[in-house]
Image (cartoon, rainbow, N blue to C red):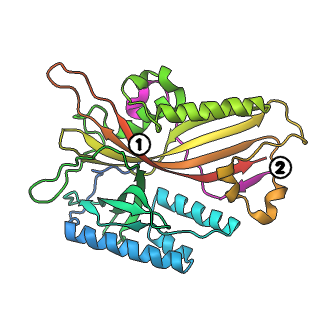
C-alpha cells in the first residue's frame, strides 16, 4: 500500500556538494533581505512592528481557542504554512490540542526598508502552555507587497543558554538589513544553509567542520542521525539522511561586531528501505511521525518497501565577520531551531 500522510509538497533542491561549491548552491534559496522591487514605499516603523506583533499574538490565541485552522493559516506564510498544517493534522489525528505559546515583551529589530518585501524581527521570552519558561523565540514577520497582510514567516526557538544576538540598532532605532550576497561576512547569508548542511550530512570529517562550530544543531545532528542509521541497519534496513535547502526566504541583520544573524529554512530528509524486502517485514515509523497517521487507519499502513520521513526546520545562525589584522576567522554558530515533522510517505 502506498500512502502519503500530510499532503505537503517536499521542498526539492540540488544535492548539496563539497565545500568548494557551497557558495552558489543556496543562492537561489528564495527572496532575500534585499530583493529587487520596482515600488518604493515607506517601510515598517518600530511602532508598526509592535502593533503587528501584538495583533498576531492575539489573533493566534483566538484561532487556537476556537480550533480555527483557517484563521491560524491566514496569519502565516512560507514554511510556517507547512509547519502549521502539520501541527493541526497531528492534533486532529491524535485528539490533542494545538496550543498557543505566551510571549513576554518583545525586543523589535526593524530594518529601514523602502521596497518589498518588508520585514522585521521580534525577540521575545516564551512560556509553554503550562506557564513554564520555554526559552526565547525569534519571530520574523514579512509583507511581500503593498496589498499583502503581515504574516509570520519564521519562528525559531533559542535555548536559555543561547548567546546574545547583539543585533546592531542605530540611533534612529532601526536595524541594518544585509543583502543575501553581502561579501563582508565570513559567509554570504545565502551560503549559510549550505555550509550548515555540509556538516550535518558529513559530520566532523567534512571540510566545513573547520569553519562551523560543533554543537547539537551541527555535529550533534550528524551524530544523532548516524546513530539512528546504525539502529535501523541492525533491524535489516538501509537508512539515509540529508539536510537540504529550500525555496523559502531567509533574512539577515547586522550585528555590532560586523557579523550578522541569519534566519533560514531547511528540510531534513530521511529515507528507509529494507535490505531484503518482504511483505512480512515492516518498516517502523519513528515516534515523532506517528501522529501524522490517522488513528482510524494506523493499522492499514504497514510500509514494507520504502519510508520517507522529513522535517521542516527553521534555523538561526550567527555569521561572524572575517578575521582582521591576521587573526583567526571565527566560526559559524547555529544557535536555534524549530523542527517539525511535515512529510511522511510510505509504500
Q: Quick one: which residue is furthest to the left in this view?
A: 171
Q: Quadrant of residue 281?
A: top right
Residue 34 location (% of width, % of height): 27, 50
Q: Earlier in the sequence, mark 2 or mark 1?
A: 1
Q: Which residues are magenta?
A: 1-24
Q: Is residue 15 visible?
A: no
The majority secondary structure of the magenta stretch comes to loop
Front-most of 154 and 338?
338
- What's the mark number on residue 302? 2
Give the secondary structure at mark 1: loop
- What's the mark number on residue 287? none
Q: Is residue 307 visible?
A: yes
Vertical relation: 138 (above or below) 267: below
Q: Quadrant of residue 98?
A: bottom right
Residue 273 location (% of width, % of height): 75, 36
Residue 61 location (% of width, % of height): 46, 75
Give the secondary structure at mark 2: loop
Q: Which residue is under mark 1?
A: 28
- Residue 261 lies in magenta, yes or no? no
Vertical relation: 23 (above or below) 149: above
Q: Residues within 10 Å of mark 1 (few under 14, many from 20)?
A: some
Vertical relation: 127 (above or below) 290: below
Vertical relation: 73 (above or below) 248: below
- Residue 17 lies in magenta, yes or no? yes
Tell me what residue is drawn at x 46 percent, y 58 percent. Answer: 78
Q: How many marks?
A: 2
Residue 136 location (% of width, % of height): 37, 55
Tell me what residue is drawn at x 31 percent, y 36 percent. Answer: 188
Q: Quadrant of residue 150?
A: bottom left
Amino acid at each position: 500500500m502506498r500512502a502519503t500522510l500530510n499532503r505537503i509538497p517536499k521542498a526539492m533542491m540540488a544535492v548539496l556538494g563539497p565545500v568548494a561549491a557551497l557558495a552558489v548552491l543556496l543562492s537561489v534559496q528564495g527572496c532575500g533581505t534585499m530583493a529587487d522591487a520596482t515600488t518604493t514605499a515607506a517601510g515598517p516603523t518600530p511602532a508598526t512592528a509592535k502593533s503587528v506583533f501584538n495583533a498576531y499574538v492575539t489573533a493566534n490565541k483566538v484561532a487556537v481557542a476556537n480550533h480555527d485552522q483557517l484563521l491560524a493559516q491566514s496569519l502565516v506564510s512560507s514554511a510556517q504554512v507547512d509547519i502549521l498544517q502539520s501541527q493541526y493534522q497531528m492534533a486532529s489525528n491524535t485528539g490533542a490540542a494545538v496550543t498557543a505559546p505566551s510571549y513576554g515583551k518583545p525586543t523589535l529589530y526593524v530594518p529601514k526598508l523602502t521596497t518589498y518585501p518588508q520585514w522585521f524581527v521580534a525577540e521575545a521570552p516564551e512560556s509553554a502552555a503550562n506557564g513554564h519558561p520555554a526559552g526565547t523565540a525569534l519571530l520574523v514577520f514579512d509583507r511581500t507587497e503593498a496589498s499583502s497582510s503581515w504574516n509570520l514567516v519564521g519562528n525559531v526557538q533559542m535555548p536559555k543558554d543561547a548567546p546574545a544576538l547583539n543585533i546592531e540598532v542605530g540611533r534612529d532605532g532601526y536595524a541594518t538589513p544585509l543583502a543575501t550576497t553581502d561579501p563582508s561576512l565570513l559567509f554570504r547569508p545565502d551560503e549559510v544553509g549550505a555550509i550548515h548542511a555540509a556538516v550535518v550530512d558529513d559530520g566532523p570529517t567534512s571540510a566545513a567542520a573547520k569553519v562551523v562550530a560543533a554543537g547539537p544543531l551541527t555535529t550533534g545532528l550528524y551524530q544523532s542521525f548516524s546513530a539512528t542509521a546504525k539502529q535501523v541497519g541492525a533491524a535489516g534496513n538501509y537508512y539515509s539522511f540529508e539536510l537540504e535547502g529550500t525555496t523559502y526566504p531567509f533574512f539577515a541583520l547586522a550585528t555590532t561586531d560586523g557579523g550578522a544573524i541569519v534566519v533560514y529554512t531547511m528540510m531534513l530528509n530521511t529515507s528507509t528501505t529494507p535490505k531484503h524486502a518482504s511483505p512480512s517485514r515492516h518498516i517502523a515509523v519513528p515516534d515523532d511521525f506517528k501522529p501524522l497517521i490517522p488513528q482510524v487507519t494506523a493499522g492499514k499502513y504497514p510500509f514494507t518497501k520504502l519510508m520517507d520521513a522529513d522535517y521542516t526546520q527553521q534555523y538561526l545562525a550567527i555569521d561572524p565577520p572575517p578575521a582582521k589584522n591576521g587573526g583567526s576567522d571565527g566560526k559559524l554558530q547555529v544557535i536555534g531551531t524549530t523542527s517539525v515533522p511535515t512529510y511522511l510517505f510510505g509504500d
